[in-house]
Amino acid sequence: MGSPPDQRRLPRRGHAGHRNRGASHGGAGSNGGGGSPVEGESARIGLQRRIEESALGRGVLSTLIVVTIVAIVAINLPGSDLRTKLMRPAQPYLNATGLDQNWALFAPDPRSVVIDVSALVKFDDGATARWRFPHDGALIGGYRDYRWRKWEENLIDPANAAALWKPAALWAASQEARPGATVTRVTLLERYAVLAPPGASPSVGPSKQRVIYTLLVLPTSARGRR
């Protein structure tokens, strides 16, 4: 009969298991300086999760969701007394969150002209400067320029003359102000071109220009005239 295999070459399960248990105890003991796994997990919970798991946090989030849904529904309601009442508190919230998109953008009468509003600022030394609306390019312009484009669109409407024309002229003057010179006149100009029907060539008609508003800046006061 042959001799039994060398036992020294076989792993000893008892010792291996003991070593594994020892390593496990060492890992747990090193977690948080001897703290329990539950305490270690609690320490890693982030601020967002703590808010979401608290009764107060869930209440605040639920309220924001309900308010947002009601505001979005209100702005899309047909014109009515109910919509008017709902929009009084809802409009500031929609403005602050950027959710005030009007789905009647292309109806019933879409704008048929391309517009470009600028301001010609004249100084007391005879120099002039041209202020234009910001253009941030294709990458981020769609997010930042939208508000400027809506202001530009409202600026050309004569119905907004009292509310927008003089403040716009003063804003342009402040943006083009320079040391040692005084602004004497600000002229708001609109350059526009009529859009041709779809499929027509060229797609845009000849460009024209008109004066929207002129602000005369006097030494002691400022007044505007059309």
Image (tube, helix red, strand yellow):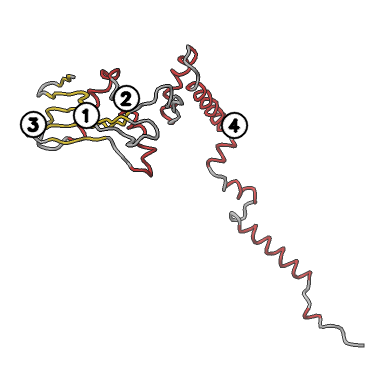
Q: Residue at x 68, y 60 (%)?
A: 25
* Cα–Cα gap, marks 4 and 2: 45 Å
Nearer the observer: mark 3 or 2; the answer is: 2
Q: Residue at x 24, y 35 (%)?
A: 132
Check disc 4 and give the amino acid type: Ala
Secondary element type, mark 1: strand
Pick the residue in front: 44 or 158: 158
Residue at the spot of label 2? 154
From this viewpoint, which residue is outermost toward the left? Answer: 125
- Report if the CB atoms under discs 3 and 2 are less than 8 Å apart: no
Q: Residue at x 32, y 29 (%)?
A: 113
Instruction: Mark 1 or mark 2: name the one nearer the start of the chain.
Output: 2
Q: Position of residue 29 (x, y in %)?
A: 64, 58
Q: Residue at x 38, y 38 (%)?
A: 142
Secondary element type, mark 4: helix
Residue at the spot of label 4? 55
* Cα–Cα gap, marks 3 and 4: 64 Å
Residue at the spot of label 1? 209
Residue 207, by quadrant, is top left
Q: Position of residue 120 (x, y in %)?
A: 17, 32
* Cα–Cα gap, marks 1 and 2: 17 Å
- The dot on residue 124 is 3
